[in-house]
Amino acid sequence: MSTEAAKIVANQIRTNPKTVIGLATGSTPLGLYNELIKLHKNEGIDFSDVISFNLDEYVDLPKDHPQSYKNFMDKKLFSKINIKQKNIHIPNGDSFEKKECDKYELLIKSYDGIDLQILGIGSTGHIAFNEPSSSLGSRTRLKTLTQKTVTDNARFFDNIIDVPKFAITMGVGTIMEAKKILLLASGDSKAEPIAKAIEGPITSMCTASAIQMHPNTIVIIDEAAAKFLKEKDYYKWVYSNSKLN
Ligand code: PGA
């Protein structure tokens, strides 16, 4: 999953060195980030003109907290590639007023939008922190996390009471404006949300299902995450016979 995703990201950056890339946090993209670091070191993939926008940031975490998404990204990717600090954008978890969230939207627009958006999927079917019932037209805003998401994210914290309950997140509408989307998922825990997202109805109860309306989305998943897909054999057949491979 990560190697395939890295090929797509690397091609995008080779084709357009000024790519505006949307980045995700969590466990899912870690393998991709490691592959990109390798490609940077071994094959000279150049991030010096790449612009990044992260999907979300926790609210109420001290800036220096190791689990802030700013620190996560610095540690797992940014410090190991040659992206410029001035080109990195992450929502500010300290300013969740509407006008601050609107500024993030305007900043994305000022770069003519996101060229390639990396997404994971939560067990609640969320993309970014767009939890069930989030408007499919939503924009960057303050969002209350579900108890399920808080529990899922507790593995990164010493104690579940330390897990933030709020985040600033790009909206589904923001994500849907990306020119290309790359959604990644692996493992049994993602099988149900993946089936809902890809083959279920388009519904705010699984915000990832909005990708069905997106004209240019690639989904890369492993066998475990694919296990409830009814048309799994068809997707494999399409892939192995693709004119684009
Ligand atoms: P994970 O999170 O990659 O840590 O499973 C995905 C998500 O919540 O979007």
Image (spheres, rainbow, N blue to C red):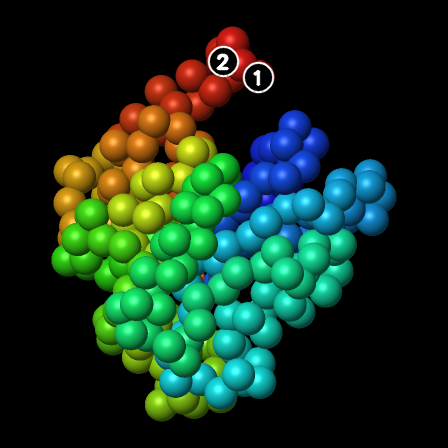
Look at the image and tell me whether residue 52 can be seen. yes
Above or below, 17 against 164 in this view is: above
Above or below, 152 against 196 in this view is: below
The image position of residue 207, as x and y in percent, is 24, 50
Q: Residue flagged by tag 2: what amino acid is it?
A: Ser
Quadrant of res 9: top right
Q: In the picture provided, is 17 more to the left or to the right than 114?
A: right
The image position of residue 5, as x and y in percent, is 57, 39
Residue visible at 40% across and 28% down in the picture = 216
| Pointer 2 with pointer 1, Cβ within 8 A | yes
Residue visible at 33% across and 48% down in the picture = 174
Above or below, 86 against 96 in this view is: above
Front-most of residues 43 and 114: 114
Residue visible at 82% across and 41% down in the picture = 44
Q: Residue flagged by tag 1: what amino acid is it?
A: Asn
Label 2 SS: loop
The image position of residue 47, as x and y in percent, is 71, 47
Which label number is shown at residue 242? 2
Q: Quadrant of the N terminus?
A: top right
Q: Disc 1 designates what residue? A: 245
